[in-house]
Amino acid sequence: MRVLGIDPGLNISGYGIIEDNAAGVSIIEAGILKTNDKLSMENRLAELGKELATVLIQFKPDVMAIEELYSHYDHPKTAIIMGHARGLILFKAGEMGIEVVPYASTRIKKALTGNGRASKEQMQRAIQIQMGLKTIPEPPDVADALAVAYCHLHAVTRNEMITV
Amino acid sequence: MRVLGIDPGLNISGYGIIEDNAAGVSIIEAGILKTNDKLSMENRLAELGKELATVLIQFKPDVMAIEELYSHYDHPKTAIIMGHARGLILFKAGEMGIEVVPYASTRIKKALTGNGRASKEQMQRAIQIQMGLKTIPEPPDVADALAVAYCHLHAVTRNEMITV
């Protein structure tokens, strides 16, 4: 199964496409979708939609995994702007017939570290280990996208977990 | 000039397309875009995107007018979900090369009633009068969409205002 994890944002959305195979979990592709903050909102979103479509068409994920919305936000306006990007990303998945599975932050943390309240550092290290990477994925948006993708594979395949 | 006003929402988005001409302002078309709340978020957004594209293609507005984001929201999670619809709507405009102009709520009220703090009832009545309608447009999402479209025409053409 090929899973696309997304960490949505208007400035930067992280994405990570992973697959499970005999050797474990491998990264097919990961990176960021970036928009030009000098453009108007509608043109930035048009840019993001185009970049995302390219990724979806090229890598044909079976499913998209994304973090659930929280019930509380410290910065509602920032969260609403993130919501603009998230809405567009979900729309693109829906339009292309890709199922979207949302996961709570605690569940993502638990899948990767065994601890639903893991710190950012614990998470980054767990991603590095689970994906067999030499270094921690950068920027953090990529690590977060890989984490939610991994959480989905874990939920579906019940892979054995390495607790760190 | 043909202006599309939008009041975005995931359940219901109101839209109103108006034009200025010798006789004043006339409504070309108005209505709602509704999504099925039994569907998944991505499929609801796909539905909304498709319905909006139909309106954009059929009525070819020159510009889209939409209410600005507030700095404060009583229900951030609801606002973030509205943000999903708003993001998709702006994306569609950007993709189709339609400029989007956001207006503050107070400016919309002022354009229609002369009073930036007008009540909902004053606004509804002003919309009815300005558009020459026999009744107040229903549901309120349609009235709100017509109001922001009117605000744009007013800002651009400085039409004389009937203060109510």
Image (tube, coloured by chain):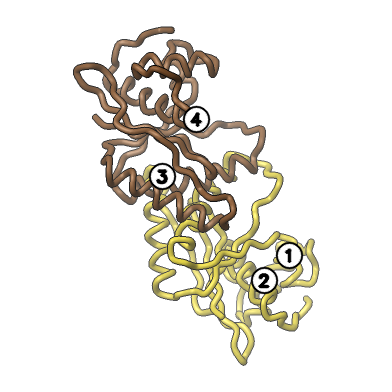
Chain colours: A brown, B yellow
Q: What x and y, as percent, mark residue B161?
A: 75, 80
Label 2 resides on the chain identified as: B
Residue B107, numbered circle:
1
**Residue placed at 69% from the left, 76% from the top?**
B154
**Residue placed at 50% from the left, 30% from the top?**
A139
* Disc 1 secondary structure class: helix
How far apart, in angstroms, are the residues tagged by discs 2 and 4?
42 Å
Q: Which numbered mark, 4 or 1, is in the foreground of this view?
A: 4
The image quarter containing residue B145 is: bottom right
Is A157 placed left or right of A141 in the picture? left
- Report the residue marked by disc 4: A139
Q: Nearer the viewer, residue B136 or A42?
A: A42
Is B14 placed left or right of B46 in the picture? right
Residue B151, numbered circle:
2
Q: Earlier in the sequence, mark 4 or mark 3?
A: 3
Q: Amino acid at mark 2?
A: Cys
- Report the residue marked by disc 3: A90
The answer to whether marks 2 and 1 mark residues whose Cβ atoms lie closer than 8 Å is yes
* Disc 2 secondary structure class: helix
How far apart, in angstroms, are the residues tagged by discs 2 and 3?
31 Å
